[in-house]
Amino acid sequence: AQSVAQPEDQVNVAEGNPLTVKCTYSVSGNPYLFWYVQYPNRGLQFLLKYITGDNLVKGSYGFEAEFNKSQTSFHLKKPSALVSDSALYFCAVRDKDSGNTPLVFGKGTRLSVIA
Amino acid sequence: KAGVTQTPRYLIKTRGQQVTLSCSPISGHRSVSWYQQTPGQGLQFLFEYFSETQRNKGNFPGRFSGRQFSNSRSEMNVSTLELGDSALYLCASSFRTSGRRTYNEQFFGPGTRLTVL
């Protein structure tokens, strides 16, 4: 069975500082990995994904994520946080090798960027 | 291109009633998934439809059902509503071929906020 863990419910960071939102995953095969962001009273917005190839993936709004197979991690990063980045962030995984399995989401991490 | 639309946006029902939620995917997207989002449980997968066929089903009771029409629009129905069904119901569409390796990202609608009194 596939699963995702986001170990931090809340991350606080000062504006202008780098931010990291952590994600680890478990799949029996190889993963497709995704990050989504949710603003209040909105649906989820896609940020970036890892399918194959380069371990460093660049996405929307200056976000990037690094796939680390040995640590089964896919942490989301941004060099300089903005107050407008404050939102709920979800990591998700799908097992590439298990056929028609649904996308599994983590519990979410609330990011608060303080001015 | 228009995004995923969900109707209604807000709904208030009482216990025992039934409800139908609607989702129109992005044009050209044939896969539609439904999720339930609550503060305690996070995002939980309900079901996925592709070409009018249910391809996956999450761990929800039979009171939760869905369907997809030939134009890829989807509906989900919850019968005999319980207080615990109060949640944000999210629909997502993706471009998917009939192949098994589904790596395309999902595009989410704004959700339907269901309150059961």
Image (cartoon, coloured by chain):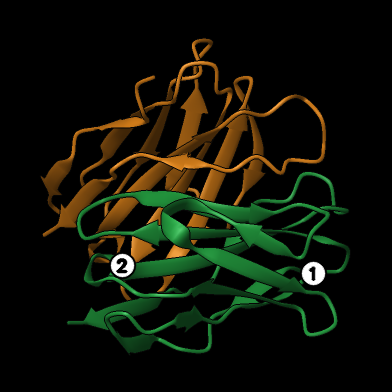
Residue B27 relative to residue B101: left or right: left
Q: SS for tag 2? A: helix
Tell which of A63 and A27 is nearer to you. Answer: A63
What's the amino acid at mark 2?
Asp
Cα–Cα gap, marks 2 and 1: 29 Å
Judging by the rendered image, the residue that carries numbered circle 1 is A27
**Do tag 2 and tag 1 residues touch (Cβ < 8 Å)?**
no
Identify the residue at image location x=33%, y=44%.
B79
Question: Please, is residue B55 above or below residue A21 in the view?
Answer: above
* Residue ranking furthest to the top: B70
Horizontally, is B74 left or right of B28 in the view?
left
Q: Quadrant of the C terminus of chain B?
A: bottom left
- The picture places residue A102, in percent across and down from the top left corner, at 66, 51
Asked if residue B90 lies left or right of residue A40, the reply is right
Query: Are labels 2 and 1 on one chain?
Result: yes
Quadrant housing residue B8:
top left
The answer to whether residue A68 is above or below residue B75 is below
Image quadrant in which you'd find residue A82? bottom left
Q: Which mark is residue A74?
A: none
Q: Which mark is residue A85?
A: 2
Answer yes or no: is residue B15 visible. no
Image colour for chain B is orange
Q: What's the residue at 71%, 44% (across, down)?
A: B103
Q: Chain of mark 2?
A: A
Residue A109 appears in the picture as rendered: yes
* Picture layout, residue A43 above or below residue B6: below
At a point 39% along the width and 19% down the height, the residue shown is B1
What is the display colour for chain A? green
What count of labels does the image hold? 2
For marks 2 and 1, the one nearer the N-term is 1
- Residue occupying the point 55% across, 82% down: A22
